[in-house]
Image (tube, rainbow, N blue to C red):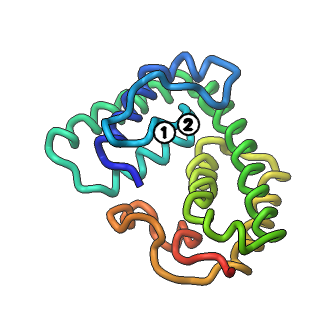
Amino acid sequence: MSSSQYDLGYLNAGLASLESYLLSDDIYWDLRAPSPPGELPYPQLTLGNLLLVRARLAARPLSLEHTRLLSELEARLDATRTKWREAWTRKAKREFGARLRLWRDFLEDYRRDPETNVDRYAYEVSRRVTLHLLKIEADPISSHEQELLAGLDKILSAVLVPGGFIWDQDLLYSFPPQDFPYLYGTLKS
């Protein structure tokens, strides 16, 4: 998982491009910002990635300086969401649909070949977490997408072996088991 510095850098870089991104037709937007030394390159800008980073940052203990920076960044994010609410919701709906298809594809791959795909779960489940975060922003989602997500959750619950939190322990606070049960276990192999 990423560091606080990485997540703050992503949030800051994303906010610099957010208005242009919201007004574009793109779901995924290249960030042209360097990540901190020794860290992976930043992922593409999406609303889902911004929301996921925000949730991770809310869970982590931050220095006073990082807490101030996060407050400033969150205020900018909220102001942009308010100013461009219609574009924000439209983008969230499109990303929800795209992420839902990717999550479905992973579960189908797993069902066809569990042995090859079981190790991908800790990474791929971030798509399900992002769907949870986007669903609030994309409200209302179509009945077809609601039914598909419910069906995928039934499939997941049938193959999930309950266990401990699978991401970094410092993120536990933002992802409680009642809201994110799929982060508390592994897939049957």
Rendering quarter of residue 90: top right
Pointers 1 and 2 in contact (CB under 8 A)?
yes
- Read off the residue under disc 1: 50
Camera-side residue: 148 or 102? 102
Camera-side residue: 29 or 112? 112
Amino acid on which disc 1 is placed: Leu
What residue is drawn where x is 82% and y is 60%?
147
Amino acid on which disc 2 is placed: Leu
Secondary element type, mark 1 = helix
- Read off the residue under disc 2: 47
Residue 109, image x, y percentages: 79, 62
Residue 71, image x, y percentages: 28, 37
What residue is drawn where x is 61% and y is 83%?
161
Up-down: is 12 above or below 156?
Answer: above
Up-down: is 1 above or below 115?
Answer: above
Rendering quarter of residue 76: top left
Secondary element type, mark 2 = helix
Would you say 26 lies left or right of 4 here? right
Instruction: Point out which mark residue 126 bears.
Output: none
